[in-house]
Image (cartoon, rainbow, N blue to C red):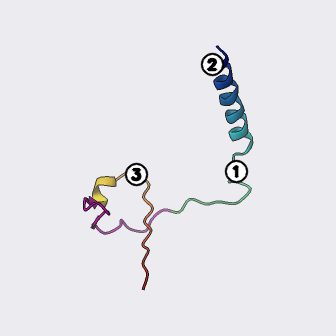
Amino acid sequence: MRGSLIAVVATVVLAVTTAVAAPDYAAMRVERIEPSKPAPAFELPDLAGKTHRLAELRGKVVMLVFWATW
């Protein structure tokens, strides 16, 4: 019973904190940017050797980070 009460209280606190801490995008003057053209098709292997294709992620938000050392 006590564990359930703690879980409920934690959920309420998290919900209130999230609602209060939500950024005000209008005040920051954030504008939606539409891509000028689709990204070209490509595929890359992950560290395990599995190939991932950009086309498999259509409709999802994708962030690519290319990192290298010389």
Q: CA distance from mark 2 to mark 1?
A: 31 Å
Query: Mark 2 or mark 3, which has the lower sequence index?
Result: 2
Give the residue drawn at x 53%, y 63%: 33
Q: Nearer the viewer, residue 15 or 5?
A: 5
Q: Are marks 2 and 1 in contact (CB under 8 Å)?
A: no
Q: Write down the quadrant of residue 1 in the picture.
A: top right
Q: CA distance from mark 3 to mark 1?
A: 22 Å
Q: Amino acid at mark 2?
A: Ser
Quadrant of the image for the C terminus? Answer: bottom left
x%, y% of residue 65?
A: 44, 68
Q: Write down the quadrant of residue 67 in the picture.
A: bottom left
Q: Secondary structure at mark 3?
A: loop
Q: Which residue is mark 1?
A: 23
Nearer the observer, disc 2 or disc 3? 2
In this rendering, position of residue 29 left or right of residue 50: right
Give the residue drawn at x 70%, y 54%: 26
Q: Write down the quadrant of residue 56 in the picture.
A: bottom left
The circle on residue 4 is 2
Nearer the observer, disc 2 or disc 1? 2
Q: CA distance from mark 2 to mark 3?
A: 35 Å
Check if residue 59 falls in the magenta segment.
no
Q: Which residues are magenta?
A: 34-52
Q: Secondary structure at mark 2?
A: helix
Could you classify mark 3 by the number of other residues whose Cα lies within 10 Å: few (under 14), some (14-19), or many (20 or more)?
A: few
Q: Nearer the viewer, residue 11 or 7?
A: 7
Give the residue drawn at x 68%, y 30%: 10
Q: Which residue is mark 3?
A: 60
